[in-house]
Amino acid sequence: MIRGKNVLLRALEKEDLAFLHELHNSQETMNYFFEEPYETYRELEDLFEKHIHNQTERRFVIEERSTSKPVGVLSLIEIDEINRRCEIDIIIENSHQGKGYGKQGFVLGVKYAFDILNLYKVYLLLAPSNFRGMKIYEYIGFTHECRLRNEYYINGEYVDVVRMCIFDYEWRQARLRLQNDIGFSNDSLKGEVLKQEKQEELIVT
């Protein structure tokens, strides 16, 4: 569990699948995403069982601290331990957008990627029209890397995506400013570090 000022990140559990299913089937919430929604709850269950032990991804629920209710999900995917990079994405339920939960949850996810997984680079993909998200990512420290032309086929047409990234040395420069803003502390990661070390021991043995 990783705590921020108003939200926390915790591991995605099977009990969270109903919330995840609702998110992925909300056109309003998924407006800026490139994924197809899950058609059935059973399909989502199958995907959860298939990926639960996949070491190339980490799935988190973003939880509102005051109510302990889920408000979104955050994923670190395509984790490449050799080249030390991953992709990050986030979905905030529509009724909780505009409250700063997305920014806080996203920063906690980036912190996890660099401080626990010891990655060198974190990148994201977003629609060129997602100006609101772009401003948030730039504030966190992400910079524009490239524009991928006709990358996804959505609603009968090909669309471009913007790729942004941040490196570990850029994160170190940004973290003090973000720590004051988001309210995380190094103490909030101690348990996650121990948990990660324990998992690695189990994998080795």
Image (cartoon, rainbow, N blue to C red):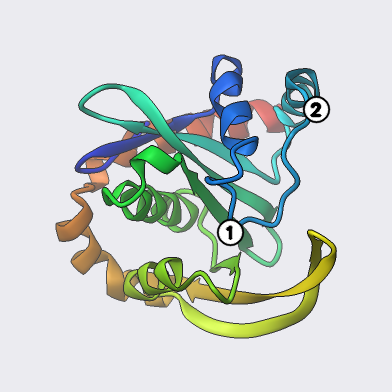
Few, some or many residues within 10 Å of mark 1 (<14, 14–19, 20+): some
- Which image quarter: residue 83? bottom right
Residue at x-position 29% and y-position 75%: 173
- Which image quarter: residue 17? top right
Q: Position of residue 193 (x, y in %)?
A: 42, 38
Q: Secondary structure at mark 2?
A: helix
The mark found on residue 32 in the picture is 1
> Quick one: which residue is furthest to the top in this view?
15
Seen in the picture, residue 10 relative to 156 is either above or below; the reply is: above
Identify residue type, mark 2.
Lys
Q: Is 125 placed left or right of 150 in the picture?
A: left
Q: Which residue is mark 2?
A: 50
Task: Locate the C terminus by quadrant.
Answer: top right
Q: Is 151 placed left or right of 20 in the picture?
A: right
Seen in the picture, residue 130 relative to 71 is either above or below; the reply is: below
Q: Position of residue 52 (x, y in %)?
A: 70, 27
Q: CA distance from mark 2 to mark 1?
A: 26 Å
Residue at x-position 29% and y-position 72%: 174
Q: Position of residue 69 (x, y in %)?
A: 35, 23
The mark found on residue 184 in the picture is none
